[in-house]
Image (tube, grey):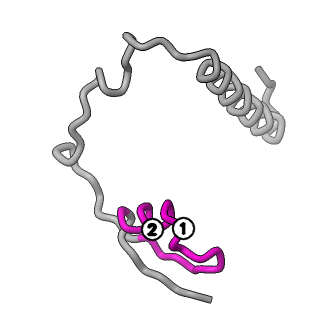
Amino acid sequence: MVTLEIPAPEFVKRFQAGEIPNNAHVTVTYEPMTHSDVSVSSSEIWDDETPLSDEELEAERRLFEKFEEGVNANRRASGMRTL
């Protein structure tokens, strides 16, 4: 077994590049972000000018259905009524 202790940004890069072995034990370290570390405008997040394609809409619908299934499963497990 390989043990790695690496900062979160490096882990993401190495994981995406396939450099992290499947059997690795990884401890990811990170520095808490402050408000000044984040500079994303709302227009970058919510771009209402570009409509979603049919494929993107279908993917969003499936994602929401999975979310709703999870919520309902948690509610059933705790004895609450489902949506």
21 to the left or right of 41: right
The magenta stretch spans which residues? Answer: 9-28
**Which residue is drawn at the image coordinates 75% and 39% (left, top)?**
74
Location of residue 34 in the rendering, given as x and y in whole percent from the top left corner: 22, 49
Left or right for 58, reference 12: right
What residue do we see at 16% from left, 45% from top?
36
In the rendered image, the quadrant that contains the N terminus is bottom right
Classify residue 77 as left or right of residue 31: right
* Residue at the disc numbered 1: 18
Q: Quadrant of residue 61?
A: top right
Q: Position of residue 16 (x, y in %)?
A: 50, 60
- Callout 2: few (<14), some (14-19), or many (20+) C-alpha neighbours within 10 Å? some
Residue that lies at the very extreme toward the left in this rendered image: 36
**For the C terminus, which image quadrant?**
top right
Task: Report the side of 42 relative to 48 (left or right).
Answer: left
Q: Amino acid at mark 1?
A: Gly
- Magenta-span inclusion, residue 21: yes
Q: Nearer the viewer, residue 15 or 4?
A: 15
The circle drawn on residue 14 is: 2
Q: Report helix, strand or loop for mark 2.
A: helix
